[in-house]
Image: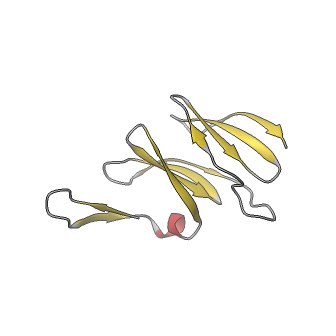
């Protein structure tokens, strides 16, 4: 994942290597980028600076199972054994339920 200058097309910044190694997929949220994989991170959409990060313990089939979804204030992340609900602003766990 790279951040490009919209006018010139030059690379402004690349996704930090530690995140790039564990990316399963990306999700947009309020102008930012959610990186889902072994950890869930929210990156500033303007400069790719990490706003927060939450480790997700990998299961047999990877850390994220299914498709996460973001609402105005929450991020719902399905894992192999539980459903996590995170606060979109802070990354703190709000709730979880076993699957």
The quadrant in which the C terminus is found is top right
In the picture, residue 6 is in which quadrant? bottom left
Of residue 26 and residue 50, the one placed in the foreground of this image is: 26
Name the residue nearer the viewer: 44 or 4.
4
Q: In screen coordinates, is 87 left or right of 42? A: right
Q: Is residue 11 above or below residue 92?
A: below
Asked if residue 99 lies left or right of residue 91, the reply is right
Count of marks, rendered view: 0
Q: Residue at x 50, y 28 (%)?
A: 72
Residue drawn at the location 20% of the way across and 65% of the way down: 9
Scheme by which the image is coloured: secondary structure
Q: Position of residue 19 (x, y in %)?
A: 52, 63
Query: Which quarter of the image is occupied by the N terminus?
Result: bottom left
Quadrant in the rendering for residue 32 = top left
In the rendered image, residue 36, in percent from the top left (x then y), is placed at: 58, 55
The residue at 65%/60% (across/down) is: 38
Q: Is residue 66 above or below residue 87?
A: below
Q: Position of residue 98 (x, y in %)?
A: 85, 41
User: Farthest left residue?
Assistant: 7
The answer to whether residue 56 is left or right of residue 20 is: right
Q: Nearer the viewer, residue 21 or 28?
A: 28
Q: In this rendering, would 1 be left or right of 56?
A: left
């Amino acid at each position: 994942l790279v951040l490009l200058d919209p006018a010139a097309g030059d690379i402004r910044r690349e996704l930090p290597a530690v995140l790039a190694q564990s990316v399963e997929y990306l999700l947009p949220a309020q102008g930012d980028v959610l990186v889902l994989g072994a950890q869930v991170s929210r990156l500033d959409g303007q400069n790719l600076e990490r706003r927060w990060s939450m480790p997700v313990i990998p299961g047999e089939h990877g850390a994220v199972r299914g498709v996460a979804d973001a609402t105005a204030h929450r991020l719902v992340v399905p894992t192999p054994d539980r459903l996590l609900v995170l606060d979109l602003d802070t990354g703190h766990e709000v709730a979880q339920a076993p699957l």
